[in-house]
Amino acid sequence: MSEVLFTVSVAYFLKRLGVFSEEHSRVLVNYVLYFALPALSFKTAYGLGLSWDVAMVTTGAWAIITLSLALAYIAGKLIKLEQSNLRTLMMISAFGNTAFLGYPYSFAYFGEHGLKYAVIYDSMGSFLAVSSVGLLILKGGLDMRSLILFPPFLGLVFGFFLKGYQLPAFLWSFIDFVVSSLLPVVLFSLGLSLKFSHIARDRKLLVLALCIKMLAAPLIALLVLKLIPMNPTAYKVSVLESAMPTMITASVLVLKYGLNHNLAFAGAGIGMVISFFSIPLWVRILENL
């Protein structure tokens, strides 16, 4: 936990000092998305294969996302939000930062074994959902080409496909070397992208969105995931992933399609800060179950 907070904080203050800029985070994010994360996805899929655990974690992720979307939609309708804010609320309430924050937290609390389930939850759940249902909410259509060609998704596909084949030792050494860089680079890029300039706008909607995403969603997960047969570590990691703040990718998509991006980026930034305090509480709850 301390490593997560310290790395993000150092990056943020180095940005404030002018050593780095927010633009530098884009390079680091591209490194993660197109190099390190596909390697981790491949390693995870190869190690697990198309197993019962993969199916159950994926099912649980989709169930939580669907219920969160429904809750946000109902809440938005009750307070009579106009369409732009309603769709924004749904996006930032349902899709969590299950990769850039979820991976470090899962590894910090549950080790490499837990990280495997976090990758499944993110790649087979969050990413597929935001790329399909999310785009449907935003523009009324699906972008299957972007989904199929997304490097981490391809890493999963190749990992599942090559399961059972003996791969050379030098390849695994390379993959392990790349994967070891993932978490510090992710956290540093998050610190560079962290901003607090949008807090004053849409305060009530921001509070509502974060309550759904970081309080209601994990409470739902605690109950719903009990109905899905999965091992204890997979259950705990799935609940933890459900408690992550707003997905940065979802915020970027909100901006791209002309919705309330100020609200979206505020949700991602403030949610990340809140997670430094809320995630340890959820871990303690999970340990006492």
Image (tube, rainbow, N blue to C red):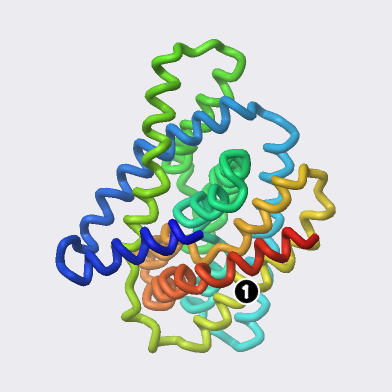
In the depicted view, which residue is nearer to us: 65 or 137?
65
* Location of residue 34 (image quadrant): top left
Q: Position of residue 275 (x, y in %)?
A: 52, 68
Whether residue 150 is visible, yes or no, is no
At 60% from the left and 77% from the top, the residue drawn is 211
Q: Which residue is farthest front?
A: 2
Tag 1, which secondary structure?
helix
Residue 286 placement, left or right of 15: right
Residue drawn at point x = 65 percent, y = 51 percent: 237
Residue 272 in sight here: yes
Query: Would you place residue 227 above or below residue 87 in this image?
Result: above
Question: Along the horizontal axis of the image, is 228 left or right of 1?
Answer: right
Residue type pointed to by label 1: Ile
Q: Residue at x 31, y 46 (%)?
A: 30
Q: Position of residue 55 (x, y in %)?
A: 71, 38
> Along the horizontal axis of the image, is 75 left or right of 11?
right
Which residue occupies the foreground of this view, 79 or 201? Answer: 201
Q: Is the C terminus in the top left, top right, bottom left or bottom right quadrant? A: bottom right
Which of 70 and 154 lies nearest the eye of the viewer? 154
